Amino acid sequence: MNTSFQLEKKHVFTGLYQIDATPIVELVSNSKKIPLKGFNIEGQVEVLYNSILIKDEEGKIEFILPSDKFFIETRAITELKMMWIEG
């Protein structure tokens, strides 16, 4: 068997996301906007019924948001690791 291995840097998913939570602005009957603030956090997102659970890096719940009031955008966080690959 003629195989060789070499080290190569690869991006590996950490299980965490860069999360942007942006409020969805709704107009109420008197035409005033509901003031809600957006935020950015690193962690995990879970949807449970009509709620969005945002957990921190340790898996503890940081925020519970109503799914009809917030728009959630996620980007996977990766880290660069040296890994053996077959060459």
Image: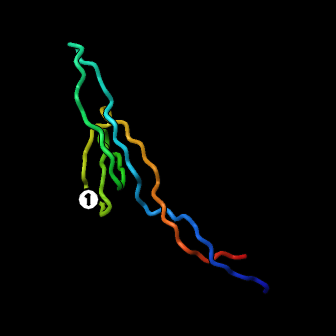
Residue 54, above or below 37:
below
Query: Who is closer to the viewer here, 62 or 6?
Result: 6
Secondary structure beneath label 1: loop
Coloring scheme used:
rainbow
In the rendered image, residue 69, in percent from the top left (x then y), is placed at 30, 32
In the rendered image, residue 9, in percent from the top left (x then y), is placed at 59, 70
Q: Amino acid at mark 1?
A: Lys
Image quadrant assignment for residue 24: top left
Of all residues shown, which one is farthest toward the right? 2
The residue drawn where x is 41% and y is 54% is: 17
In the rendered image, residue 47, in percent from the top left (x then y), is placed at 35, 46
Of all residues shown, which one is farthest toward the top? 30
The residue drawn where x is 30% and y is 57% is: 56
Query: Is 8 positioned to the left or the right of 68 in the image?
Result: right
Residue 76, above or below 12:
above
- Circle 1 residue: 60
Residue 7, above or below 10:
below
Check disc 1: other Cα within 10 Å, few if <14, some if 14-19, many if 20+: few
Query: Who is closer to the viewer here, 34 or 66?
Result: 34
